[in-house]
Image: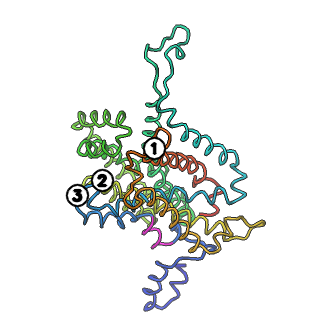
Amino acid sequence: MSDVIDSIPVGQRSATGIREWFRVPPATERVRWWHVSPAIDMAAYHFSWLWILVPLLLAGPSFPGDYFPLYVAVLTFGFVHRHYTLGYAYLDAEVFARHRARFIWVPVVLGAMLLATPFLLRARIPAEALTIGAFRWPDDAFRLKPAVTAVIFAAGVWNIWHTLAQKYGILRIYTAKGRVELGNSGVPGWVDRLFVMSWLPLVASYVGPRFSEVIIHEFKVADDFVAPILTGLTAAQHVLVPISVAITAFATLTFVAFEWRENRFRNRPRLSMALGLFALWSGFVVFEPIKVYLAFAFSHGIEYMVFVWAFQRRRYSVPRDPQPRMARILEHPWLAYSLYTLALGGIYVFLYDWGDFKFSQATNVRVGTVKIGRWVFYWGVFQSLLHFYFDGFLWKTRNASMTQSL
């Protein structure tokens, strides 16, 4: 592409360069450096959090009343993006055959656990049933409700890892593309992973204690796990914060050093992605953390949806025999993605707020022994676990089956 631009008269290069920056290349065209194009990558991957953080910062401080529509928008995108994998998994015969047992039995097992939730919340295992030989369980029966809470807490923790792992994966895509352009080995994976994850200790030790009440309110279902952690972080804050700052500084300087050593700052997509991530992490200590957290969640959803779109447009751009059902659906991509996204978003908004009746806050309506609002919450956990599981093996960027469509 640079050879083509060099052949254009100087007076026309600026306009041509701008058009190339914003152009969406055909699915079959090889793209240098970037995943889709500079404009799309920056808007969807690197700085997508700005789309929601700016209006959030202009709104009042009260959570979530001062920015309730934006709050619901973030939650809706979170719900929608979890389902973007389903077509690829179940409507592409080649992919389904490759993971047939996983796609059938894991949803069945998780669904059975979801339906068994009322029993698990009430069940007790007698102490004598847990006595093995000389090992004796305490006299009280063992309640399974804490185990349900533990699964919910683990899902929340894994969601953090899952969100950061996605950003790490995008960085590695740019590394792989940079290897082709520069002919080098690229920045090691551990450098990127350290850079992406290094802010976690600082956010936990500095932000967590300052907003413990809001955090406990939002995660009250896992209060047994969250409250002791926040208490410990508050007590050790004077020690943990300086250590955390040192970790963040070391990770950032290491990233910059390796980027210069390996790429001489020529891999612009990596630099842009790193700048966007650094600015987003910094927002936790500059702005209201809840708003930055929402921006983080929003960017994750946008990243995922655009990534799946970009992957599928390349995968299905080459005719196959037989043609996968998913490819036939995506012959009209704008219509297919728009209808699917609107339908999922409508379902979520309906469940969250149906006129004057909020499923999420219903107190007197029960299905079985569980309030309907709580069922909606447990259903959300079920979706998250299924989403995490599928993503764990479907979207590994180092897999040969994926790199062909990246």
Of 125 and 324, the residue lying toward us: 125
User: How many other residues sit within 10 Å of disc 1, few (<14), some (14-19) or many (≥20)?
Assistant: few
Residue 345 image position (x, y, % from top left):
48, 63
Does the segment drawn in magenta span residue 307? no
Residue shown at the point (40%, 48%) measured from the top left: 197
Residue 328 image position (x, y, % from top left):
69, 70
User: How many other residues sit within 10 Å of disc 2, few (<14), some (14-19) or many (≥20)?
Assistant: some
Residue 129 image position (x, y, % from top left):
54, 16
**Residue beneath disc 2:** 290
Q: CA distance from mark 3 to mark 1?
A: 34 Å
Of 19 and 366, the residue lying toward us: 366
Mark 1, secondary structure of its residue: strand
Quarter of the image that includes the N terminus:
bottom right
Q: Which mark is residue 61?
A: 3
Does the segment drawn in magenta span residue 39? yes
> Is 28 on the left or on the right of 78, as rendered?
right
Q: Amino acid at mark 3?
A: Pro
> Is 17 on the left or on the right of 391, as rendered?
left
State which region is magenta.
Answer: 37-44
Mark 2 and 3 residues: CB-CB less than 8 Å, in contact? no
Residue 312 image position (x, y, % from top left):
61, 65
**Residue beneath disc 1:** 366
Between circles 2 and 1, the one closer to the viewer is 1
Quarter of the image that includes the C terminus:
bottom right
